[in-house]
Image: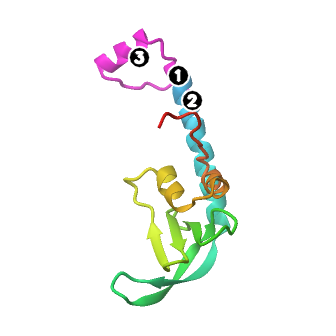
């Protein structure tokens, strides 16, 4: 398929001068997005209802019926779920809180902050089709 993509002149010149292979870059990103969406669809297909006891900020408690699937095996006090609505939720059993991923935050960073065990984080991100682990990063 032949596709025309617009780049502002300055950016196009820079890409050309830098020798970027734009066609290859686009193909890689589109394939990555296709894998990610397929992974999310597979996760949503496994959804079931999970009842969670939640303590609201106002002191009231309620039972949340989460329509989703776990993103990782049981592993401690925190569980991440993929909802049927394709949003990611984290339930913390220690304080009975249920949090929803805010689209303005990086999903990997957000999940890593709750899933302290690397293997749980990797499993959750793999289920979402986005498994990326930073190695060799300068602190």
**Relative horizontal placement of residue 12, taking residue 45 as reference (left or right):** left
* Residue identified by numbered label 1: 23
Measured as percent of width and height from the top left, residue 124 is found at 62, 57
For the residues labelled 1 and 2, say whether their Cβ atoms are less than 8 Å apart.
Answer: yes
Q: Which residue is mark 3?
A: 15
For the record, the magenta segment spans: 1-23
Q: Which mark is residue 60?
A: none
- Residue 100: which quarter of the image? bottom left
User: Which mark sits nearer the N-terminus, 3 or 2?
Assistant: 3
Q: Position of residue 7 (x, y in %)?
A: 35, 23
Vertical comparison of 8 with 135: above or below: above
- Whole-angstrom CA distance, mark 3 to mark 2, is 16 Å
Q: Nearer the viewer, residue 108 or 119?
A: 119
Question: Which residue is labeled 2 in the image?
Answer: 27
Crowd around label 2: few <14 · some 14–19 · many ≥20 (10 Å): few
Using the numbered discs, state the Cα–Cα distance from disc 3 to disc 1 in whole angstroms: 12 Å
């Amino acid at each position: 398929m032949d596709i025309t993509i617009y780049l502002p002149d300055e950016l196009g010149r820079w890409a050309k001068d830098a020798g970027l292979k734009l066609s290859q870059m686009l193909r890689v990103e589109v394939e990555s997005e296709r894998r990610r969406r397929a992974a999310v669809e597979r996760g949503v297909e496994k959804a079931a209802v999970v009842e969670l006891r939640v303590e609201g900020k106002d002191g009231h408690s309620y039972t949340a019926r989460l329509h989703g699937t776990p993103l990782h095996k049981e592993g401690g006090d925190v569980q991440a779920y993929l909802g049927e609505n394709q949003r990611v939720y984290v339930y913390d059993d220690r304080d009975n809180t249920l949090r929803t991923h805010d689209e303005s935050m990086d999903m990997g960073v957000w999940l890593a902050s709750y899933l302290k065990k690397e293997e749980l984080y990797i499993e959750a991100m793999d289920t979402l089709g986005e498994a990326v682990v930073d190695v060799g990063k300068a602190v």
